[in-house]
Image: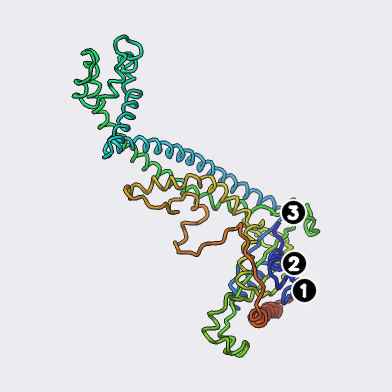
Amino acid sequence: MGDAKTVSEIIHKISPHYAKTKKPDIEHTLVYDSSSETLEPLYFFIIDLLETFGYPPQKLVDNFTSSPGSGHFGELGQRSSIMQQQGTQLLANINTVLRSVLNIVYDLKEFKIRLQHYEDLRSKNKDTVSAARLSLKQLWMDKVDALKGNSGIKAMALSQAGFQTLIDAFLASNTLVDVKNLDLNDRVKRILTPRLTEFNAWVEESEKELRKRYELEKTYLRSQVNSLKLYSRWAKPYLKAASELENKDFGRDPGLVKVFNTMLLELNVVGKQKIKVKDLALEGSLPAEFQKESFLKSLKRDYYSYVVIDFKFRGIPNKVQGTQHYSFGGKAEVTFKGYALNDDELARLDQELEESHLGDALKLIEGSTTESISHLQDEINAFLDETDQPEKPEKPTNSSNPFLALLGFYNKEEKSEKPKVSSKEKIIVKKDSWIESEHLRKAAIAGVKVAVFNLFDVYKKGHGMLSYT
């Protein structure tokens, strides 16, 4: 379950500054209770207000649960089942195509090994040419000549008297002149001559056919990979919707009674604003020396005024007549909190949230696809890239990864990004320096106090609150 205090608890855990204080720099709470008016205007008014004050909002937590006996629970359960069924069908299609991709990759590997023998025949190294020819002769005897039954070279050499030397003679001869120079009886030579001619013709024709088949298989692989991308894009919204429609466990919250028509909702919205050191220095809020470019370049971390807004709704779902939608009236408790955080603290906060239960749904979606193809991705790209640059294969890129599509990768523009810190490597948040502690953080605190109070005050004056603190 996503707790509305999760963000605040993490901040108090990761920040050396707030680990001591154990409380935000400012906190106000308001309570709005109206069963006749809907809760949506309250939420969107605060979101728009946050945007107006220069704190672009970002939603981190969005959890809900309905009473099992309510109509809202049953209807959402049906919608969730539909999403699950659609997602399951698409995943089944993905698995089918994936098996096809695996088979094609293995076939292409075999073709590549076979084609290497033909490439070696044109080598300048005599030993390499000899080894390649012997390999092709063995293949021809096993796959082509063996179809002749008792008249095949191996069958005659192993079962008929007088032909014991036939296999060795065939392997040792490369041209008709070599056959004539062999110290063998004419009967063996008469059998060996047409077989060697047939083998040489087979080498030329089989290479052409194998290369055609190789190119066709690569074309089919590209088609299957594109199908995989398409299925992945289709599956994403269904899997995501099915996860979002799940009821969360709110434990023993007394507001949730099994047979009542009630719903509990938790939302957590944050917004941040970077403090402008130079502007504050010009205003006189910071020392005049902070205006200098040399000082600004010496700063290692930026500081932000960080607003955290916790919403707790206890609503009564009412179905809008003539539609399939619900309106929610009820009690809303909104808590405004303010913090001053630096770059390291924000990065660590994002890391903690990613590793927590907040990212579980995304991990499940990613795990159902990405992990299953990761080991083959380089090989797939290697085959697909051969068409464009057969002589100089480049390092595989992510452009043909069929599973990154599921996470929206192909909707993003390619950028040269800085190396990201691994999720396993914890970001270390260093303590504030004297300048950061005495000036920058205090400036961020002053800014967030004004912002939080204004958010709280504007909404309080514009609406009749049941209570506020």
Q: Quadrant of residue 109?
A: top left
Nearer to the camera, 30 or 282: 282
Q: Is residue 462 above or below residue 156?
A: below
Circle 1 residue: 466
How far apart are the alpha carbons under marks 2 and 1?
Answer: 9 Å
Name the secondary structure under disc 1.
loop
Contact check, label 1 and label 3, Cβ < 8 Å: no
How far apart are the alpha carbons under marks 2 and 3?
Answer: 16 Å
Name the secondary structure under disc 3.
loop
Of callouts 1 and 3, which one flags the residue occurring earlier in the amino acid sequence? Answer: 3
From the image, which quarter does the N terminus lie in? Answer: bottom right
Report the amino acid beneath label 3. Answer: Ser
Q: Quadrant of residue 198?
A: top left
Left or right of 82, for residue 5: right
* Residue pictured at 69% horizontal, 75% vertical: 338
Contact check, label 2 and label 1, Cβ < 8 Å: yes
Residue 67: mark: 3
Nearer to the camera, 458 or 1: 1
